[in-house]
Image (tube, rainbow, N blue to C red):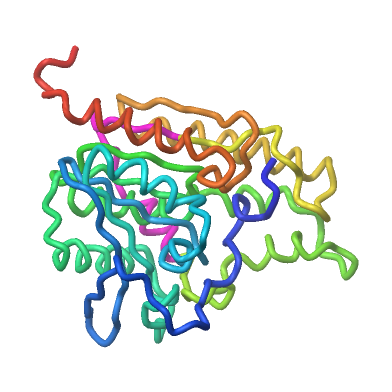
Amino acid sequence: MPGDAASFGPESGAERVSSRRMHPDFGSVRTGERTLRYICRGEGTPAVIIDQGAGLSIEASCLRPILAGWPRVLRQIEKTTCVVMHDRAGLGWSSEPSRPRTSADMVHDLRRVLHDARIAPPYVLVGHSIGGFNMRVFASEHPREVAGMVLVDASHPEQWRRFAKILPPQSVRESAIVRRLRGWSDPAVTGERIDFTMSAEQVRSTGPLEDVPLVVLSHSPNALRPPGLPAELAGMLEGAWSELQKDLLGLSRRSTQVVATHAGHHIQLDEPQLVVDAILKVLREARVPRQTLH
């Protein structure tokens, strides 16, 4: 069970920065009226494209004195191949969005980043939480560019419908986390103004990955329970989440699930080596010519 509500709904509000200092390794690209900040490290192919969960600025994370989470994963992967991450609109120094945004909108911005950075396909797509939505939409729109995928405790388009059936009747005494689970569909929940409802619909319309290598990396069922979430309710939500994570395995005929030993929703923080190993596994499989596979 995760130590926060992130795996059961949208993550915390978008991380904005107060300092004027920017990371020297980040570049900027204009897309429409917005500026997006991104980092590209390492060399090699397939390139690894990582899309983080809602509310997390990668640039702000890279400025911290101790590398943890995605910056730590990035540092490991760049030893093997090219890796790209960016701050979506509403994160870090990237421009704030002027309207609610869907996964298709976020994929459009990501394509602009890849074009500006001159990162050619094929890609191994890595999506954490809502980033899993975005990577599935990317793969659906550009299937020939995708060499593999890693879903890191990724959102499932049916999760909120499932949770709504589990949550008890609304009460004025319910905890903040339960109220948060009820309010998942409001784009104002995150500074990124993500339209979770429309994004889920877009993901429902995507097709399978066929024989693309896929690793589904899921949080530990033994992770700490979020404070304010009753044990019985937490158990039912955890059971639904576990079932939906297993359902993601059906996206590809070459899928594998890895369940963390103790990590919560933010596996990249709690057990970063699991994330690194999953990415490297997919890279190895993606580099094997398909005609030699049996």
| Image quadrant in which the N terminus is located | top right
Residue at the right extreme?
Answer: 173
Residue 87, image x and y in percent? Answer: 38, 68
**Rendered residue at 30%/46% (across/down):** 125
Which portion, as a residue range, is magenta? 198-216
- Whether the magenta-drawn stretch holds residue 87 is answered as no
Which percent across, then down, holds residue 19? 49, 82
The vertical placement of 36 against 67, above or below, is below
Residue pictured at 71% horizontal, 33% vertical = 222
Residue nearest the viewer, comparing 186 with 275: 275
Residue 211, image x, y percentages: 23, 28
Residue, x 20% and y 43% (percent of image)?
Answer: 146
Name the one closer to the observer, 105 or 45: 45
Question: 177 left or right of 258?
Answer: right
Does residue 37 appear left or right of residue 156 in this picture?
Answer: left
Image quadrant holding the C terminus, namely: top left
| The quarter of the displayed image where residue 292 is located | top left
Residue 208 among magenta residues: yes
Report the number of discs: 0
* Image x and y of residue 131, in percent: 41, 55
Q: Is residue 75 left or right of residue 46?
A: right
Q: Considering only vertical position in the picture, is 274 above or below 116?
A: above
Instruction: Tell whether 44 sits left or right of 156.
Output: left
Q: Residue furthest front?
A: 65
**Image-quadrant location for residue 285:** top left
Which residue is rendered at x = 29% and y = 83% of the image? 34
Residue 2 or residue 243, whichever sits in front: 2
